[in-house]
Amino acid sequence: MNDSPLPTPDSPTPRHIAIIMDGNGRWAKARHRPRSIGHRAGARAVNICIDACLEKGVQALTLFAFSSENWRRPAEEVGALMQLFLRALDREVDELHRRGVRIRFIGERSAFSPDIQTRMARAETLTAGNRQLTLCIAANYGGRWDIVQAARAAAHEVLAGRLAPDDIDEARLGSFFSLHDLPEPDLFIRTGGDLRISNFLLWQLAYCELYFTEVLWPDFDRAALHLALKDFARRERRFGMISEQLAQESPA
Ligand code: IPE
Ligand code: IPE
Ligand code: MG
């Protein structure tokens, strides 16, 4: 399953992939193990995706690691996730830096422990100059939070006299959102079989291609990613137009 080739370089490859990494708990449950074991197993799939993105020249990969609603889980699970997060920050960052990955975090980070916040800042600073791939980790992230923080930032600009309310258009408001300086996500993947967005990137997914798979996140391997990329390559993205117009725009 794991060494099948990815699509050829001339096939349309997404510039930005955004993933809801779901199904860790069910993966562990099926093995009669605690949910935390599923989260640990999910780390392997993260590395597979990063490798494939580097190999394919994907510019950005955004991973939903912890939602603003995930604090509602049992304290024991939240604690295990925080431990894992801390460990990943200690173990993985230097290697990612060596491979030219720029690391970023999106979400409200003040809710994390000082330990975690310090490591997040270090990872971002250390890797700021890297250009191979931008890896965005959505941690304590919510799409509605993003809308609120963008609206608040715009309101501050208005109050400071730097922005007129009538000048707020999609481009200007969009510039306050997380990920605004990256290409918009082209491909959204959700593993685990649930057909919902769960408060992930609400603004940014406006014209993203959505792909859902039953595969549980710890089982998501190169072959599973290959299928998603193949499916993406077949899609016709019309952005409101009709097929004939697209043919005119880019004659084969
Ligand atoms: C996703 O897997 C990981 C996080 C939300 C942190 P889940 O833990 O939601 O796994 P399921 O959906 O219960 O199987
Ligand atoms: C979404 O998964 C959040 C992450 C993968 C981090 P959830 O498992 O929390 O989503 P819901 O609650 O089932 O919609
Ligand atoms: Mg879940």
Image (cartoon, rainbow, N blue to C red):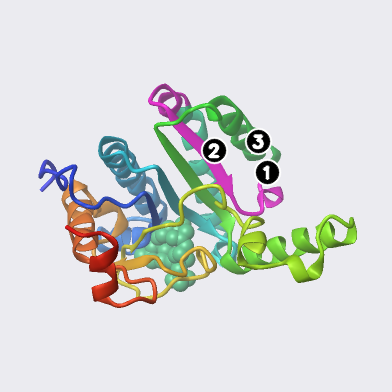
Using the rendered image of the protein, determine whether residue 213 is visible from the camera's viewpoint: no
The boundaries of the magenta stretch are 94-112
Q: Is residue 114 magenta?
A: no
**Kind of element beneath mark 2:** helix
**Kind of element beneath mark 3:** helix
- The mark nearer the N terminus, 2 or 1, is 2
Q: Mark 2 near mark 3, Cβ–Cβ under 8 Å? A: yes
Q: Nearer the viewer, residue 7 or 10?
A: 10
User: Which of the numbered marks, if any, corresponds to residue 86?
Assistant: 2
Residue under pointer 3: 115
Q: Is mark 1 within 8 Å of ligand 1?
A: no
User: Which of the numbered marks, if any, corresponds to residue 113?
Assistant: 1
**Kind of element beneath mark 1:** loop
**Measured Cα–Cα span from mark 1 to mark 3:** 5 Å
Q: Residue 104's quadrant in the figure?
A: top right
**Residue with the most extreme top position:** 98
Q: Residue at x 66, y 54 (%)?
A: 108
Q: Residue at x 64, y 55 (%)?
A: 175
Mark 2 residue type: Leu
Residue 203: where, in percent of width, then height? 54, 67
Q: Which class describes the residues within 10 Å of circle 3: few (<14), some (14-19), or many (20+)?
A: few
Q: Mark 1 near mark 3, Cβ–Cβ under 8 Å? A: yes
Residue 24: where, in percent of width, then height? 35, 58
Q: Nearer the viewer, residue 130 or 50?
A: 130
Q: Mark 2 near mark 1, Cβ–Cβ under 8 Å? A: yes
**Residue with the most extreme right position:** 160
**Measured Cα–Cα span from mark 2 to mark 3:** 8 Å
Mark 3 residue type: Asp
Q: Nearer the viewer, residue 121 or 176?
A: 176
- The mark nearer the N terminus, 2 or 3, is 2
**Measured Cα–Cα span from mark 2 to mark 1:** 10 Å
